[in-house]
Image: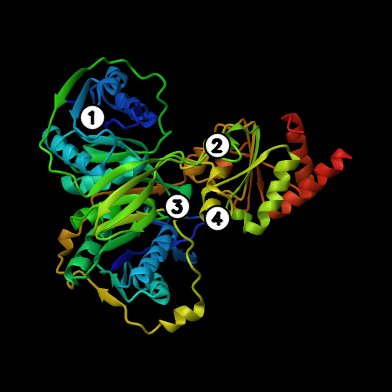
Amino acid sequence: MGKVMVLVEHRKGEIREITYEMLKKAQELDKEVEAVLIGEDLSELKQKVRPYCSKLITVKVEGLNEFNSEPYQQILSQLLTQRKPKILLIGHSSQGMDLAPSLGVALGCGVITDVVDFGFQNGEVWAIRQVYGGKLSAKVKASSETVILTVRSGSFDPQGLLVLEGEEEEVSFPLAPFPYKRFLGFLEAPKAEVDITQADIIVSVGRGIGGPENIPLAEELAKALGGVLACSRPVVDKGWLPKERQVGTSGKTVKPKVYIALGISGAFQHVAGMKGAQMIIAVNKDPKAPIFNVAHYGIVGDALQVIPNLLNKLKGRKK
Amino acid sequence: MNVIVCLKRVPDVAEIDLQVDASGKSIKTEGLPYVLNDWDNYALEEAIRIKEKTGGKVYALTVGEEADEEVLRRALALGAEEALRVWDPSLREIDPYVIALLLSKTIKDNAIPFDLILTGVQAQDDGYAQVGPILAELLSIPHVTLVNRLELQEKRVKVKRELEGGLEEELEVELPALFTIQSGINEPRYVSILGIKRVAKKEIKVLDLSALKLDPGEVLPKIKVEKLFPPPVGKGAEILKGSLDEISEKLLEIFEKGGVI
């Protein structure tokens, strides 16, 4: 039996990318990789995952097309009690965040969330995760019989997944009804007035811009450069800009030629949405801000002083 | 409706050069500014709004030392009826499970009557995002994480959860239930220093392990931090130095090379 088991994440009939990222790391740790796929209509989903594991365990549940943590927890508690893998991998996604901690309690095992790397050492499981907004890393250990890890998306490159062509094993478990949490439906984001994903040049503002009164200044810079204005999550949370302008895991993923980050600290959730930019320029007061790890050019200073000076120079240049 | 809200006081590390302490497992905390965890601030505001709309009481809970009462005072100033703090000097290694266990015992032993429990989605220091769902499991009630809208109905709640890439899902949940609140769900109100002074004398109930009838041997973490270290730095940015004018000139050069202007 394999030491590592991967929970397949899917939504609306599509396998989520995090599944392949987890399978890749699992393959590196152990030759035997088991994956678990739970849902109603599994015929197409299983074709997309089975090639990459030694065994695909499928659990067909009527009425469970989309994720719901309650039946998932019931199924996985029974499966893990039987099979006792050393590690269960779950994505650190909206699904994993809803499932992993309470599943850990049900099984009495350790749960380490949002990990970017992990392995075994002397019978224990270790994992690396970021703390304090990415300013420090932590090595965390757990020694329960099974350890649940939720994996941060983008931590492992799924390129080069080995084709194992494993067998499928269908299993079923008795399920208590799951009436507490009823899935009503998905709500798509409304169509955006400005599509920031199509822009070549993006000027993006974060909490460090100070207040809504400074948004027009950043907008002026965006216009002067022929680009559009975007932002990080705190700016939307505070209502300074609409959600459609948000770059990051819960917002949009952008790949412009130039991305100028003003007063953005560079939390992982933001970086995940913009690290594909060809050139990143960051302005931040904090020299230790994580944004400088992904930026190509950095300016340690106040964006509110940098922008007006730059605007003047841009205007002067045009004359 | 009665609402329990769980709060955490955390260091505000923006613009701070963090240092690891001698143990190698935690940070040097001297001189750090502390704040209410940002997500908890939204949870607290939501709790107060539910009380204002439906009547009932708000109970604010925290696990921590005396200095952490600051976040409870904030809750009291906003109108929370009761505040409870759990701590014991024997507590050394704390993980999300230990925090949730202490909170669950506090709620059960004090027979705090509740319809909803609210926590933040995660804490801005360790970011585990675990205490809420573990607490729900220990209390045998349903939970929903990442909630960005709560619509109260009779005996049940309609909630929206934030998924990835701007997608949301809608769920209906029976009460009592626990919700972890996502930032941006509301606009937390301002608390004046005067408002906090006004509740300075209000009683905060303090509970230790013996008050909760817990043996230190029952309060053991499931996971342990072995060490903290600076994250691996990639190539890193080329930092542009000089006066504002010089920096702007360099930026113009970069823009020209990149074909921006």
Q: Amino acid at mark 4?
A: Gly
Q: Quadrant of residue A278?
A: top right
Is residue B9 something that shows in the picture? no
In primary-sequence order, the first of circles 3 and 2 is: 3
- Asked if the residue at tag 1 contacts the one at tag 4, i.e. Cβ–Cβ closer than 8 Å, the answer is no
In primary-sequence order, the first of circles 2 and 4 is: 4
Label drawn at residue A132: 3
Query: Gap in Å between the C-alphas at discs 2 and 4?
Result: 21 Å
Q: Which residue is mark 1?
A: A40
Is the residue at mark 2 from the same chain as the one at mark 4?
Answer: yes
For the residues carrying marks 3 and 1, which lies nearer the camera in this image?
A: 1
Q: Amino acid at mark 3?
A: Tyr
Q: Which residue is mark 2?
A: A274
Residue positioned 27% across, 16% down in the render: A164
Disc 4: CA contacts within 10 A as few (<14), some (14-19) or many (>=20) = some
x then y, percent, for residue A58? 20, 26
Q: Quadrant of residue A36?
A: top left
